[in-house]
Image (cartoon, helix red, strand yellow):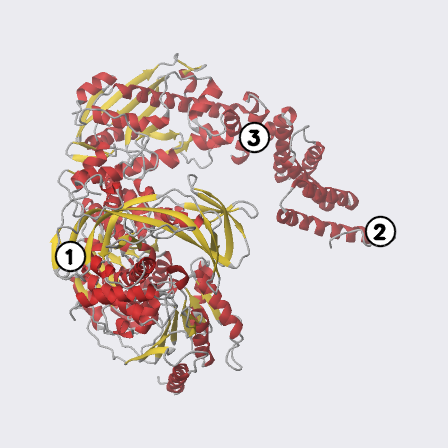
Amino acid sequence: MTLPALPVVAGDKDRLLSEALDRLARSPIPGGRDADPIVTATKRLPAVAAEYGDFPAGTDPRLLAALAARGIERPYTHQAEAFAHVLAGRHVVTITPTASGKTLCYNAPVLDAILKDHATRALYLFPTKALAQDQLAELHGLVQLIAREAAEAEGSEQAGDPIGVFTYDGDTPSDARRAIRGKAHVVLSNPDMLHSGILPHHPRWAKLFENLKFVVVDELHAYRGVFGSHLANILRRLQRVCRHYGSDPVFICSSATIANPRELAESLTGRPFELVDRSGAPRGEKFFLFVNPPVVNAELGIRRSYLSEARRVSLEFLKHNLQLILFAQSRLATEILTTYLKDAYQGPRGALGGADVIRGYRGGYLPNRRREIERGLREGHVRAVVSTNALELGIDIGALDVAVMAGYPGTIAATWQRAGRAGRRTTRSAAVLVASSAPIDQYVIRNPSYFFDASPEHALINPDNLHILIDHVKCAAFELPFSMEEAFGTEDVQQVLAVLAEEGYVHAADGQWNWTHESYPADAVSLRSVSSDNFVVVDITRDERVIGETDFSSAPATLHEKAIYIIEGQLYQVERFDFDGRKAYVREVDCDYYTDAITYTKVTILDTFESEVGCRRSEVGDFGGDNADASSELQPTTSDIQPLTSDSAKRSHGEVHVVSRVVGFKKIKFYTNENVGSGELDLPEQQMHTSSYWLTIPAGVMAALPYETDDRRDGVIGLAFAMRHVAQLLLMCDGHDIGLSVDGGSLDRRTRTGGASTVPDGVATEPNVFIYDNYPGGIGFSRPLFDMHGLLLERTRDLIASCPCASGCPSCVGPEGNTGPRAKAVASAILDRLVAADPVPS
Amino acid sequence: MPGDLASRLRSIVRPAGARDLTYEPEPVRYDAAIDLDRVAHVLGGRVATNAFGRALVIDRRYESDRRHGRLWIGDCELADAEPLRILDGSLRDPDGAGSRILFVDLETTGLSGGAGTVAFLVGCAWFDMGALQVRQFLLTSYAAERALLCAAAECLDEAALLVTYNGKTFDVPVMETRWMFHRMEMPLEGVRHFDMLHVARRLWRERARADDPDGGCRLSTLERLLFDVRRVGDVPGMDIPARYFRFLRSGDARPLEPILEHNRLDLMSLAAVAAHAARLVEQGSALCRDAAEALALGRVYDRGGRATNAIECYERAAAEGSTEVRAEALYRLAVRLRRDRRFDEAANVWRQLLDVRPARGRSGRLLTELRHVAAEALAIHHEHRARDYAGARELALLALEEANNGELDLVKVRTKTDATRRRLARLERKLAANDNTHLFGGCVEGT
């Protein structure tokens, strides 16, 4: 069985990888300075040997035979553990690194149960359709093996009834749906389809729900924020329907490494979970490199383009004949990098020609093309793939030699996921992170221990956000009447129903709440964006055609008149923005700039839940009342609290009213990011009630600053700019999940001419920096930020202090042109005093 | 969002500003108990008791001498299902236990389907001794749905043939959902189903559209066009759910009477339309009111494999129709004849089609397309059957010309003309071979 050639090839690969890494680590810095190293960290992760467990006694022999035929004689410890929990009827969540055989954790117990009782049904949920397709192929293969093993074991042609495995999603043809409802033992779907296509039609799925033994939620970490809050409610609805049909399924979840997998699983399902977090899968040696593009203009803090740097790094590996995946942050960047690599890569001498060995991969490619690329990667003739996060999740592309990330993926968890795309079980692999100039990237790249040593992020959800909850109570009432005693989440659902009854949605009679409305409530709920009320983008260059859509809240900022709208590299200019008709008409243009909207945001405190100065905490009751949004100068909370020291900052969280309006825009030149023009806009304002964390900078700290009013104002804005990015880092959230506002004050107000700013003029004696949940009703970020306040300030200070720029750049307090010449100095001075007054206990 | 939970909820559920109410706000609390016996009295129904409880049943009988528009009810009876099988080729042979042709129409709490869409009124009708017997089952509370389904199933079980209007898409799936919701056995399992909507579209779509461009082929439009039925004080369909919800809240059944009447009229018209369609296929083109209907009926016969009847209809339509109707009738006639291998007659009809000219002031887009097809077909006929290459060449050139006339889409023109160009090239070769003394070099473009 041993092939003499193999070790040589493997050894050769290891040597090539070492060579490439050496060259990268030693590479001269083109125009850079020694003080600012390109490679900021090199980490070696040693190889780990496999640890095996045993399949539970009584596992169906046909399943065991099929797995053995796949080369799986014994399960890894985590697989065995998960299997045992499920067998005992316990809900289980498994965290395991990429490529550790996590699908077996759910496929094995599910198939085992189906083999033992043919009536058994299972529902698998994946965050995307592509993942469900991928898993379908995997499961299909296993099912066929089982059929073959069963036939052989019985020595006959007949292998018993086949196990039906089907995807059910928006792409499923309507004539196939009826058959699937009857035949599928395992239905692979996604939350959106469960929400709008399955649950509202549960009577047609009676057979599934009566026999539903397992619900698999894969890629659990993807369900955070708004999406996760929706899923939690969908799973509440699912469990209601199951109760109606007399079933009580076991949940089997798998997640990438996050800080709170069990808590997330429990809040998504409302059930107690067992956690399996020790992987028994083997892993080869891995090197992790952090690369920071060199500064090319120290004054402005401009670094060499991270895309060019990612290209350079990738080519180094390609030259060494190593197969790699290059992750880009956007579809646009994906296309640019694909072009770069195709242009530059000639292939190793005498090897395959340059054309099809470099491929792009992103959402929007047709399924056939995607499958072809995935196959090319597995078979090895595709040498490099440039991808968006589309390949971050578990699509099977085999194990590659190197993963390069152009830009920090935003979270520790996602970074490990992407890094895990490289690495076989026995050979060496490498992951390289190339930082962009965004503050988050710069923080991570200059503080490697944050990434390597700290725990990964918490995934947060707020299923009882009233906006989300109400939508799902409507859906649930449509599906089944609510009884007068029934609970749904932690809020009082009976009260929710009473209010819905006032509006005619439900009616109480005979001891239950019945749905009494013509609508199909699931249609009005969009799981993945803030509002289902979308704007469509209409291209009028030739005929009118719809080329994209944008959610309600970001439309004014991205689709205002004269805005540059970019899709797949093509630039369009908005000619007309029809706010009432929810449409933007665009025309193709060829220009060298993009636009950035200027949004004026005003936050008014309505209700402070908690407030603390230094180490003293006080619960503050309602003070806002119904007239709370009357004045922007409202700051009544401070008077009754005496700070322990004058430099201690006050932190608070509570409910706020946010009014935002897009007042103008800037034209920013591509590549150089120069500001080349601006315009004013008059758009309707948007309002919402949400929750917020806020920092109040003490008057004493402000007064002690040896700077002019303008500079002090700039400093607060710069501080807020940096703080927002650190908050995003700490919260594991997307950039648009949180909003930022700095309040002004009546004092020190002076008039500024021209243009508009994100903050009002002047600076308050005690300015507040608000970081609010950018979703009506809040999504649960404020309280955690309040708790992490000390860390937030310290990290923000570190970010600004360690930035090599002279007086502000996009990586810390914002570009100098935007924030003023002393913003960095003032922000640092404020933060130094705040952190010194309340040091974070280590 | 300060304040207690209820006011926070209200601020979300009821956004500020004007909004359309789906019901009339009433000052009283909506906990009116619904008295079934009283509702039965108000609506002229009776209470039927079964294993699941009590259900409200409303019976009405319309004798054969009663008027429905300009029809008598007696005219609306279908003797048997045979003519329907010509109208709908997928209708199976009769089988099963039931004996009735049963007309069914639901009134529901919404149009979306799904678990939350309830059929609050199940209307059934059948002919009994020449009279139309209508039986309606009304849901008086959601809790009584099983009793209703059980009562309705008894009536539905009598059906040998189900006749509906859009029932394949709507009524039957809704019924399936209701029975499955309650884990009860669905009646009508395996019963033949004739959906009148599809046939009506084939026969009268153009006429209905001319009358009401957005109405599709609504039953209310057809009953007026075909039988001059004028409803007085009818409830618009879109108001029906709100009216029913109001009854659930108030317990006042009087506003339901117009819904019951609406449902009964729908059932009557359904029977009338089905009978009319059946009579049309039985009697053929003679019964058609005009050339357009004859053309539509011809198409129906054609689908049903009744070639002789189809040809008769097409011929009448070609003789009496407007330019468009005549052109399409000739086209279909020629295709039918060709399929029956009556090639010379078909060629004759193609020639007639080539002689049709667009009416003044009308766009001749469709006509040009048909003329293109005719020229192509004739060219084929002349090349392969008549072996008249010169004539075929002329016709192919004409086909090219028509293709370029009519079509704005260049890709489509290309696909159409490519075949014709190939034909031309081949014809030139054949002509050259037949007559070596002539040279045709350079006269064929695009080859």
Contact (Cβ within 8 Å) of mark 3 with mark 2: no
Neighbourhood count class around disc 2 (C-alpha, 10 Å): few under 14, some 14–19, many 20 upward? few
The Cα–Cα distance between marks 3 and 2, rounded to whole angstroms, is 45 Å
Observer-nearest residue: B185 or A97? A97
The residue drawn where x is 21% and y is 39% is A626
Residue position marked by numbered label 3 in the rendering: B298
**Which label belongs to residue A685?**
none
Mark 1 residue type: Glu
Label 2 marks a residue whose chain is: B
Asked if B294 appears above or below B441 in the picture, the reply is: above
Image spot of residue A623 (x, y percent): 16, 44
Between label 1 and label 3, give the one nearer the viewer.
1
Q: In this image, B105 relative to A607: left or right?
A: right
Element assignment for label 1? strand
Q: Quadrant of residue A801?
A: bottom left
Is residue A733 in view? yes
Same chain for the residues under marks 1 and 3 in the image? no
B94 sits to left or right of B59: right
Front label number (2 vs 1): 1
Amino acid type, label 2: Asp
Residue indicated by mark 2: B435
Element assignment for label 3:
helix
- Up the image or down, A478 lies above or below A315; here it is above
Expressed as whole percent of the image width and height from the top left, the position of residue A374 reads: 42, 67
Specify the farthest residue to the top: B65
> Which numbered disc flags the more N-terminal residue, 3 or 2?
3
Residue A313 horizontal side relative to residue A475, left or right: right
Residue A612: numbered disc = 1
Percent position of residue A566, x then y: 47, 55
- Callout 1 crowding tier (Cα within 10 Å): few <14, some 14–19, many ≥20: many
